[in-house]
Image (spheres, grey):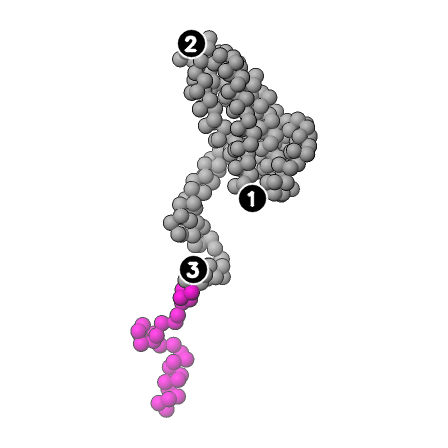
Amino acid sequence: MDNRSVSAALWGVLRHPVTELVHNWNWKSAILSSGCRALIFFAANAPAGVGAGVRAMLTELLFRACASGLLGSLTQTLRSAQPAWAAAVAALLIMPAAGHLAEYAVHAAAGTPRLAASLSASIGFTCLTTLFNLFAMRRGVLIVGAGQRPLREDLRLLPRLFAAFVIAGCESIVAAAGSVAGREPCSHEDTPPDQRLSRDLRRDPDHLPRAPAAGRTGVETAGARRARRTRFG
């Protein structure tokens, strides 16, 4: 996986949109996302009637079959971009914003009755799945083209990946909270001793340990005993 900056990845999409978004159209994202979102729109609109729920479901299914494939392609393009946090921000803001505007227009034209509730659920689903897809694609899952696995193999790995995604998210929250509180986000035991000493000295120059005085601890070193014997004959 060729690491590059987020700006370089986005510039590549602007220079070669057909190659990046159409030729690399992510059919895995299209299948999985359109199916899940269709169920969301059905559940959100079913209170207005089963017919309304079915119409909203079919409208979302057809729309997302195209839109989610493009979003998946962009996410796959950003999977190798660094830093990771900037890639996540770009993946969350660029294509999803345009996608939800188009989604609103399509459903408004189709007469979806509970459009506000449907879009709110869809936006929340986008935030979660975009971050998870980026996490999975960085590990070679849910990608298309070179290095892709069969979809059934990706599906088999998803539960384990989702557990790792949740754990990584919790660790990031704890690390961020520790940084805000002025503590080091990483475990003290995970840091090599020389780096721990260097880090602690930067935080507190007086951190360097001093040997305790023999009189204070009651422990006399061998060198001190030899010096005493020499001094007193």
Callout 3: helix, strand or loop? helix
Give the numbered dot on residue 178. none
User: Which of 81/12 is in front?
Assistant: 12
User: Which of 161/94 is in front?
Assistant: 94
Label 3 environment density (alpha carbons within 10 Å; few <14, some 14–19, many ≥20): few
Give the numbered dot on residue 83. 1
Where's residue 130, x and y in %?
Answer: 52, 31
Q: In the rendered view, would you say 98 is above or below 204?
A: above
Q: Is residue 216 visible?
A: yes
Task: Name the image quarter holding residue 6.
Answer: top right
Q: In the rendered view, would you say 134 is above or below 99?
A: below
Give the numbered dot on residue 49. 2
From the viewer's perspective, is 31 left or right of 181?
right
- The magenta span reads 205-233
The structure residue drawn at horizontal position 60% and vertical position 27%, both measured from the top left corner, is 70
What's under tag 1, amino acid-wise? Pro
Where's residue 131, x and y in %?
Answer: 51, 34
Q: Is residue 208 magenta?
A: yes
Where's residue 170, x and y in %?
Answer: 43, 40
Q: Earlier in the sequence, mark 2 or mark 3?
A: 2
What's under tag 3, amino acid-wise? Arg
Callout 1: helix, strand or loop? loop
Q: Provide the residue designation for mark 3.
A: 203
Task: Name the image quarter holding residue 218.
Answer: bottom left
Q: Tell me how far mark 1 sits from mark 3, CA to CA.
A: 26 Å
Q: Tell me how far mark 1 sits from mark 2, CA to CA.
A: 47 Å
The structure residue drawn at horizontal position 60% and vertical position 25%, both measured from the top left corner, is 69
Label 2 environment density (alpha carbons within 10 Å; few <14, some 14–19, many ≥20): few
Q: Earlier in the sequence, mark 1 or mark 2?
A: 2
